[in-house]
Image (tube, rainbow, N blue to C red):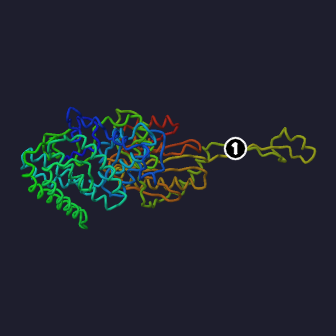
């Protein structure tokens, strides 16, 4: 497995990043990104001030709002951005971009210029995913193996900062996204400059000057003659990257162009920088099948090293995000609140294939009678009758018109709140599935004309994710393809969570053909139903 070290916000001197290397007795990590943002001033206006209105003074709400907005921004970049989360949240191991919450924590709502920095950060890192930067590293892997260690470190820095320049050029195709990336780049370069020794030529400062000059900035005011010739070579590489960014051909072709360009210009550069000082000697790329690994690195993943959000805040943020999301995993984790339980990812997915059940009309009528007989009843008094039981309140009407009788009636309320939860795992294929579809169709018809609510869900597993899909929508019935394992425990909790809390007693009828073998245990679902006052019945099939 390959690993590109992309430490977007290093927060400790242990972080394997050039920006945290000590110099002159000090460490660059002593001055964090938050410090540079603080220096920018809270009063300065930001681009996001024109559109970001969903803000909050509450910590968990503000962190959730920020994350939701950043995900929407990345949605405009492409489909392969991956997941974006704060460090310390539940899916960090599967996330492509993990953000440092210390940048924003402390003052809510956060200043607009801080939010601009975050937008630029996720745009920059999202472009790395869209443009397949990891593929460029893999294409150059064989060339890296042939190099000496010092040359390899320099070549890694060339690729690393070259890709940073390239994705910023890509972002400039959109004027607004380019503005955000510029704000992120300015803070990044200022912090990187903080870690560069002054007075002697170093390869680390060279590549930073290269990235700075690629966008006509002047963060490095001092001029050193030994930089002039190497920078001229690197400026030509910048133009090569610019032409590649304008290419209309596919991503794979652009990766080939970049990998060839890095190798070509490295051959022109290596003699010019031979013997130069290297401040940070960290290798930024680790080929597959190597025993040396930097801690907590993932292939092609943007990551940081910090303590992350506190667990309570993380759960609150995830729960707030779930309200507008199909992902129910954070809710299930919060409801179970048991670290010993293995909780599988679970998501809502409304299937759109209509079912065609064979309805048993006789059974449907019998069910209607059962619902009426066993329904809760309310007492209704019919007064002013000419016969029946005496009504003491109307005895004075006896000599006038004889209407001094009453009749007491008990009318069924018909306010059932029932959820059918169907096992849709692979073992339910064939006759079992058809039997269940017919059953749901029969129960659904028996509910017609009642002031009752019938909900039906099917659950199944695909690629390690438990899907829960709605089977009833108005008068329409749907079906799902049997697939995967049985996650009964989590499905019961999800169905109970999705049930409305009004309208009488709540029942869950769980139909399955076997025991749970995926996700949390069934006892957790039973416990949750007991807590919520939901009657749970399990029916075996087959």
Q: Position of residue 169 (x, y in %)?
A: 27, 58
User: In the orientation shown, which residue stands out farthest toward the bottom?
Assistant: 248
Q: Nearest the camera: 253 or 458?
A: 253
In the figure, 85 relative to 168: above or below?
Answer: above
Q: Position of residue 40 (x, y in %)?
A: 37, 44
Left or right of 446 in this view: 331: left
Give the image location of residue 304, x and y in percent: 28, 41
Residue 341 sits in which quadrant?
top left
Relative placement, left or right, of 461 versus 253 is right
The number of numbered badges drawn on the structure is: 1
Q: Residues within 10 Å of mark 1 (few under 14, many from 20)?
A: few
Q: Nearer the viewer, residue 430 or 63?
A: 63
197 over 142 or under it: above or below: above
Q: Can you see residue 118?
A: yes
In-image side of 231 versus 124 (left or right): left
- Closer-to-camera residue (513/68): 68
Question: Residue at position x 16%, y 48% from top?
Answer: 224
- Give 149 or 307, whichever is nearer the viewer: 149
Q: Say above or below: 539 vs 361.
A: above
Splitting the image into 4 quarters, where does residue 250 fall? bottom left
Q: Position of residue 531 (x, y in %)?
A: 50, 34
Does 435 sit left or right of 302 as displayed? right
SS type, badge 1: strand
Q: Residue at x 32, y 53 (%)?
A: 182
Give me the residue at 45% from left, 47% from top: 421
Q: Is residue 426 visible?
A: no
The residue pinned by badge 1 equals 410
């Amino acid at each position: 497995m390959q690993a590109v070290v992309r430490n977007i916000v290093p927060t400790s001197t242990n972080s394997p990043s050039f920006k945290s290397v000590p110099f002159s007795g000090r460490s660059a990590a002593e001055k964090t990104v938050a410090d540079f943002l603080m220096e920018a001033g809270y009063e300065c206006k930001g681009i996001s001030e024109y559109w970001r209105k969903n803000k909050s003074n509450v910590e968990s709400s503000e962190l959730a709002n920020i994350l939701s907005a950043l995900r929407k921004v990345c949605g405009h970049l492409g489909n392969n951005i991956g997941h974006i989360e704060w460090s310390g949240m539940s899916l960090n191991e599967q996330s492509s971009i993990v953000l440092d919450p210390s940048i924003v924590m402390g003052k809510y709502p956060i200043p607009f210029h801080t939010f601009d920095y975050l937008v630029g950060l996720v745009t920059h890192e999202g472009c790395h995913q869209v443009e397949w930067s990891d593929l460029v590293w893999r294409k150059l892997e064989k060339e890296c193996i042939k190099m000496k260690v010092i040359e390899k470190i320099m070549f890694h820095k060339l690729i690393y900062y070259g890709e940073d320049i390239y994705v910023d050029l890509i972002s400039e195709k959109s004027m607004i996204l380019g503005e955000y990336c510029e704000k992120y780049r300015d803070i990044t370069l200022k912090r990187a400059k903080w870690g560069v020794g002054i007075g002697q030529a170093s390869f680390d400062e060279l590549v930073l000057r290269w990235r700075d000059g690629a966008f006509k900035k002047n963060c490095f005011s001092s001029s050193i003659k030994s930089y002039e010739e190497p920078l001229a070579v690197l400026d030509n590489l910048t133009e090569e990257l610019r032409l590649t960014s304008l290419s209309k051909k596919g991503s794979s072709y652009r990766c080939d162009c970049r990998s060839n360009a890095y190798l070509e210009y490295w051959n022109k550069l290596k003699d010019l920088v031979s013997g130069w000082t290297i401040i940070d000697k960290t290798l930024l790329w680790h080929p597959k099948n190597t025993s040396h690994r930097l801690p907590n690195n993932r292939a092609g993943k943007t990551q940081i090293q910090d303590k992350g959000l506190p667990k309570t805040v993380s759960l609150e943020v995830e729960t707030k995000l779930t309200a507008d999301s199909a992902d129910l995993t954070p809710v299930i984790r919060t409801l179970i609140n048991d670290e010993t339980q293995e909780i599988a990812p679970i998501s809502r997915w409304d299937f759109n294939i209509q079912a065609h059940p064979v309805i048993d009309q006789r059974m449907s009528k019998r069910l209607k009678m059962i619902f009426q007989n066993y329904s809760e009843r309310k007492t209704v008094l019919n007064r002013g009758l000419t016969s029946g039981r005496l009504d003491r309140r109307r005895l004075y009407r006896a000599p006038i018109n004889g209407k001094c009788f009453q009749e007491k009636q008990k009318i069924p309320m018909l306010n059932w709140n029932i959820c059918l939860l169907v096992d849709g795992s692979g073992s339910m294929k064939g006759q079992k599935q058809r039997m269940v579809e017919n059953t749901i169709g029969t129960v659904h018809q028996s509910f017609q004309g009642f002031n009752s609510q019938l909900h039906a869900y099917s659950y199944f597993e695909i690629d390690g994710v438990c899907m829960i899909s709605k089977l009833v929508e108005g008068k329409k019935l749907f079906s799902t393809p049997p697939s995967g394992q049985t996650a009964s425990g989590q499905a019961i909790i999800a169905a109970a969570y999705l049930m409305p809390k009004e309208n009488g007693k709540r029942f869950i009828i769980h139909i399955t053909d076997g025991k749970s073998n995926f996700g949390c245990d069934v006892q957790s679902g039973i416990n949750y139903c007991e807590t919520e006052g939901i009657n749970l019945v399990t029916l075996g099939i087959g």
